[in-house]
Image (spheres, rainbow, N blue to C red):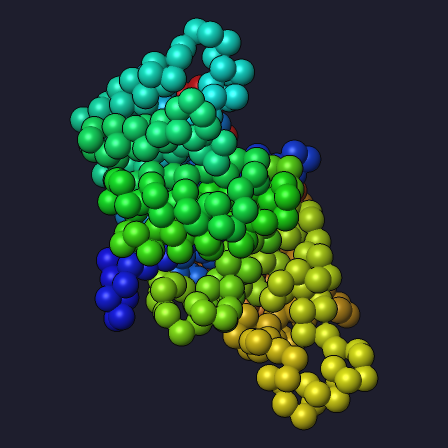
Amino acid sequence: MRTESGQPTIYLLDVTNRDAVQTSRISLSKFQKTMVNWYLSGMGIHQSEMGFPTYTHEVNYINGNVALAEKGAFGDMILSGWTPAKADLVEKAIAQTNIRNLNISVSTSRIMTEGKFQGRMDREDIIHMMTDAVDVAKESGIQLLGVNAEDASRTDEAPDEDYLLRFALAAKEHGADRIRYCDTLGFDRAHTIYESAKRLAHAVQIPIELHCHNDLGYVVANSIEGAMGAIDAGVDAYINTTVNGMGERAGNADMVSVILAIRKSRGLRERNLLDPTIDLTKAWTICNYVADAFGVPIPINQVGVGANAFAHESGIHADGVLKDRHNYELYSPEELGRGEDDYCEKHPTGRVITTGEYGGRAGMKHVCEQHNIPIFDEQEMLELIMAVNAHNQLPLTPDEIRFIAEYPEEVRQIVRMWPAGE
């Protein structure tokens, strides 16, 4: 696709529900993952990598979300799954779920292939294993297939500097729609990932995904400069993000930071490269929802949504921003959907009535009336609210109750952890 300027476009592929949930010590319930998909779609994010279709405990969640997508609950957002690049696992993913978009992944660096496979496979075997998996996926009706080169940033080392290109070209020849360049250890720097992504994109001429980690603190810069390498080679780029930058070890590219950097930074703000469907005013809500769901508070200095993102104390700064906010602000709180009512509704004071795992009809009716939420059947809705509350182990938000009221059958499937009959 092309922007009005005729240039390729940068899209966001959010991996909160796949990569961020792998973060040690935190997790999301299946219903919370569903709500993340709903919030992402409302924000205009192009694609959500929703989970693991080979895991039995993900089957109901994935099939429930596919059914929701077919009902239009997620708008035009693409839902996709992730699996290792093995033919038998691709077959399993397709057999037990209704997923139709997939990313398959295998390590490409010498250190990982030798360390993981311990001599059982050489690097040519890795390519053959990947292409076999691609063949199975495309023959089985997978509509959108990405091939991930895990540890791509440490792959092209002597004596085989062209291995990543051979890997990517083989993937394309067998029908891959995108190549994911993974800076798995946050090893790259802005200029090296730009050159690597540009070289890769120029060779394969299909869209390039950038999947970066923050081990050295470069994650947002690397994600954007890698995307620019693909753009400058003439293909679309997809940046993998997570809400609040959650992810393994030091995290992934923070969604809000990536959006703001592309829209506001020097040399990029004039180019209008970002997917125009993205609605940044939804950022405040989804960032706070995910923070509460994970139980990880948003850092005070978090870009855009932190408590101090628009706080000014220094005399010079305060004076300057009061005269003209542009003196010390590249963007406004309103652009991120920050408003007085949001916080008050989310954390009310005074008398509070909630509904949840041990609630009753009166409390449920009060909460629903308070937020103009329709009740489809008092007893059934109460039982479903109780089940979701037990599933989440958190009080339900008004948006969650509203979602239950609108999609009760799909919610009932999602909160059931095991396939029917087991």
Instruction: Please say whether residue 254 is visible from this viewpoint.
Output: yes
Residue drawn where x is 34% and y is 43% of the image: 199
Quarter of the C terminus within the rendering = top left
The one nearer the camera, 31 or 4, is: 4
Residue 386 screen position, x and y as percent: 59, 44
Q: What's the residue at 57%, 65% (across, down)?
A: 284
* Image-based side of 250 in relation to 376, left or right: right
Is residue 317 toward the left or the right of residue 268 in the image? right
Image location (x, y in percent) of residue 295? 69, 47
Task: Answer with left or right where residue 340 lies relative to residue 83.
Answer: right
Up the image or down, 214 lies above or below 264; here it is above
Q: Is residue 271 above or below residue 216?
A: below
Residue that appears at 62% across and 59% down: 288
Can you say whether 341 is above or below 83 in the image?
below
Picture coordinates of residue 108, whole percent (x, y): 42, 26
Percent position of residue 362, x then y: 62, 59
Check the picture and name the quadrant holding the N terminus.
bottom left
